[in-house]
Amino acid sequence: MIEFKHVSKTFYIGKSEVQAVKDVSLTIAQGDIFGIIGFSGAGKSTLLRLVNMLERPTAGKVIIQGTDISTLSPKKLREERQNIGMIFQNFNLFNSRTVAGNIAYPLKLAGMKKTQITERVQELLQFVGLTDKAKHYPDQLSGGQKQRVGIARALATSPDVLVCDEATSALDPETTGDILKLLKKVNQELGITILLITHEMHVIQSICNKVAIMEDGAVIESGPVFDTFTNPQHPTTRRFIGSVQQDLPSAHILQEWRRHNEGSLYRVTFTGDTTNDPVLSSITKKHNVDFNIVYGSVQELQNKLFGNLIVSFTGQETAISRTLEALNDIVTLEEVTDIEG
Amino acid sequence: MKVDWMTFWPRIVEATGETLIMVVATLIFGSIIGISMGLLLFVTRDNNILENKWVFQALNILINIIRPVPFIIFLVAISQLTRLVVGTTIGTAAAIFPMTIVASFSIARVVENNLVSIDPGVIEAAQAMGASPLRIIFTILIPEALGPLILGLTFICVGLFDFSAVAGTVGGGGLGHIAMTYGYQRFDGSVMLVTVIILIVMVQLAQWIGNTLSKKLMRR
């Protein structure tokens, strides 16, 4: 478990000061895949480096499994770091060592016996699917393979926590998918808590169970990924969500639609069980109203379905308003205004 | 008077040996001191693993003072110190002392420059794994920079032949001394030619060894 308690970090560059992290409090529970998302310069990278004291907080505490790690002596901190694996955007492999040598390095640091190291390296190579690359050097590997080595190296000492610094940002979409799958496997099979930072919402969408959104050094919103996606509070959060799911047709299409049709457009949002029931058709049928889906999608998020439809209704005015009332009891309903588009 | 080559060859062989001793001994001592200084210079930089403004500045200034002084002037300028340490200012041993000092500072710079080119992320990764600063120096910094480092040392080594010749002119012995006394002062072109050829061969050999070694170690 990782706890940030009112953590701040200020950098002093010459006479100017930059507050990279501002009073952040977050709890990452055992077994979480916790994602921190933000635009570049939001302070997420600094926040991540506070976990293993690559950066020291100017205020507040970082508590890992009950110990405040900023109070540890240098020696104790080095021991604690063996319990926190880290992977990087640019992999940071040791170019002078082979794949096996890279993975063996943290084990040597931990003082493991040579025969045990060989065994453990084999085990890790198998886990990340690189058994045939043991004797290769990093410059002979593709980006995805390099990150697999990075992951194997980070997992070598069986840490409780894995922190990922933009681990997929330098990879192509397909490789990104593979690496994300591997991270999920790390979490599920080895029970390792993962804290990752990214600027890509699809990373959060595909593997995280919890998310925090950072802006300007502060956490502006955090919670379970499903809740955040279905009910975002902050405009920045909506922008991130908009980057992976377009929940509204373009302004052009909206204008076209209004030119040819009368009445209003409504956004109907289904979550959980309501996605399985024929809510729209049963209610409209009951009130003798027709509906037309103008735009929309149903997606899977965290093993739950989440639907978002833009709908128009035609029929008697009173019937429509009764339909809207009835719908409002079961699903989330809001009128679409042009400003949104 | 021209030299009699029948009796002069042993003199050439001896001088070649002296030059080799000067260069190799300087390279060994200079590398030990220079690499240590270069590492210290690098790790005490701002934001590095053993950041220390005072140590860094002191070393930096010292290097900047010694390096621009022309070797022949430096050689003479520290002759009192050479006498104190070696006991004499004449001969091969007396030449090795000032050569080592100058080489050390040059090597320190070369080492620092090579270390700077290491991706800081690699050092950060080692830190994140719990490696101590000393461990990082010996198991990350040196191996990661070894290929270019050997090339840098080769470059210095070639320069040392130059230094040895300069030292030779002021009593250091070696091929420089032979070339000056017989080739220059007695106008014997054949001696000059022979020493130049031997120097060229030695330099080529040094460069070849350096290139081969670094190619073997270079993983980039």
Image (tube, coloured by chain):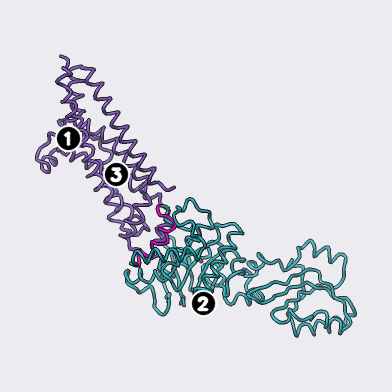
Residue B186 quadrant: top left
Compare marks 1 and 3 and give the one earlier in the sequence. 1
Q: For this view, does A336 lie left or right of residue A76?
A: right
Between the C-alphas of marks 1 and 3, the distance is: 21 Å
Does A156 appear in magenta?
no
Which x, y percent locates residue A65?
42, 78
Q: Is the magenta stretch mostly helix, strand or loop?
A: helix
Residue beneath disc 3: B107
Q: Which residues make up the magenta segment? A: A96-110
Q: Point out the frontmost of discs 3 and 2.
A: 2
Colour chosen for chain A: cyan
Residue B132 quadrant: bottom left
Residue beneath disc 1: B76
**Label 2 sits on what residue type?**
Gly
**Label 1 sits on what residue type?**
Val
The kind of secondary structure element at disc 2 is: loop
Colour chosen for chain B: purple
